[in-house]
Amino acid sequence: MEGLSALLVALLLVVMAAVVRWRRRVPRGTVGEIAAEDAPALPAQDPPQLAWLTAEQQARWQRQVQRFLLEKRFIGCAGLVVGEHHRRTIAGMACLLRVQPNAEAQSLFPTVREVLVYPDAFLVPSAPQPVSEYGLELVDDAPDERIGEHGPGQVVLSWADVEAALAGDAVQVVLHEFAHALDSENPETEGAPPMADYREWSAVMGAEFARLQRHRRPPVLDPYGATAPGEFWCVVVEAFFQQPTALARHHPGLFRLLAEYFELNPPLTDASPLAPPGSAA
């Protein structure tokens, strides 16, 4: 009997531990737990950068958002019920990247067919890493936790981090992943969206990418951008939209390059894009 009692106690402890782990992994907020018929009709949240746009650009942005909503399929994951406010908020952020005068005559993020939305950060299996020329691979069983991902035909997002970006977080997951989508439209180059002239782009981006790789504690750009030219481009896009003043102060060349490409004029609160790099933040 004592052995049976001990076994029952052990099983109970295992079940309790599993419940605790499950609770700890419940996403922030409860949006994923609301049934579709009971979900409140929450308003969409326009990106704060909408204030940067001229009246003409805002009208173009509205039309691009409607295109996005018609062309892209949204899928809720891990219990999240995608509502109109999710769709409209994400579309509004993504379309900040496509308000140039010629944008409406072009395909809108043609490499993205669907947007997957999780309530919070999500787990993806780790990819095997080659460790020798003989094909040996190092496999990590632990999955990676991510807040966004761009893959063939889709973008995956954490809704909690979409909301954090709206609140001013330096990480802007929607812009980061759709910057990848722009990059993927031009497979012959990495870290450059389609454009007519790559000479200045290549010179400025190449020099700043090398600078970030040398810099142990960069003041503005996420160090993750040093891992690859494609990630560098996406990190610079995040900084341009979330920290324009700091980007203009520390990386005036990058600021000018993106302002010209997106044809946007972000307000700079306490610095000029002509200020030398390295000024106090």
Image (cartoon, rainbow, N blue to C red):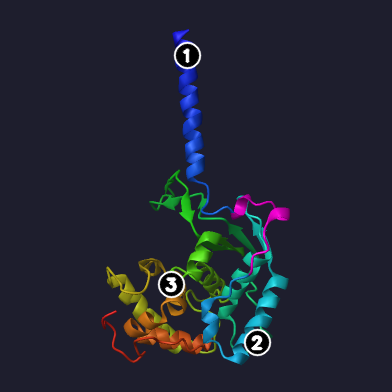
The answer to whether residue 101 of the structure is visible from this angle is no
Say whether residue 274 is left or right of residue 44.
left
| Magenta span | 31-43
| 50 lies above or below 215 | below
Residue 235: image tag:
3
| 95 lies above or below 14 | below
Nearer-N-terminus badge (2/1): 1
Query: Real-space Cα distance between discs 2 and 3?
Result: 27 Å
Query: Real-space Cα distance between discs 2 and 1?
Result: 71 Å
Q: Secondary structure at mark 3?
A: helix
The local crowd at label 1, few if under 14, some if 14 to 19, many if 20 or more residues have their Cα within 10 Å, is few
Of residues 232 and 156, the one nearer the viewer is: 156
Residue 59: image tag:
2
Residue 5: image tag:
1
The residue shown at (62%, 63%) is 154
Of residues 211 and 258, the one nearer the viewer is: 258
Front: mark 2 or 3 = 2
Q: Amino acid at mark 3?
A: Val
Query: Real-space Cα distance between discs 3 and 1?
Result: 57 Å
Q: Secondary structure at mark 1?
A: helix
Q: Is residue 281 magenta?
A: no
| 20 lies above or below 27 | above
Nearer-N-terminus badge (2/3): 2
Of residues 194 and 73, the one nearer the viewer is: 73
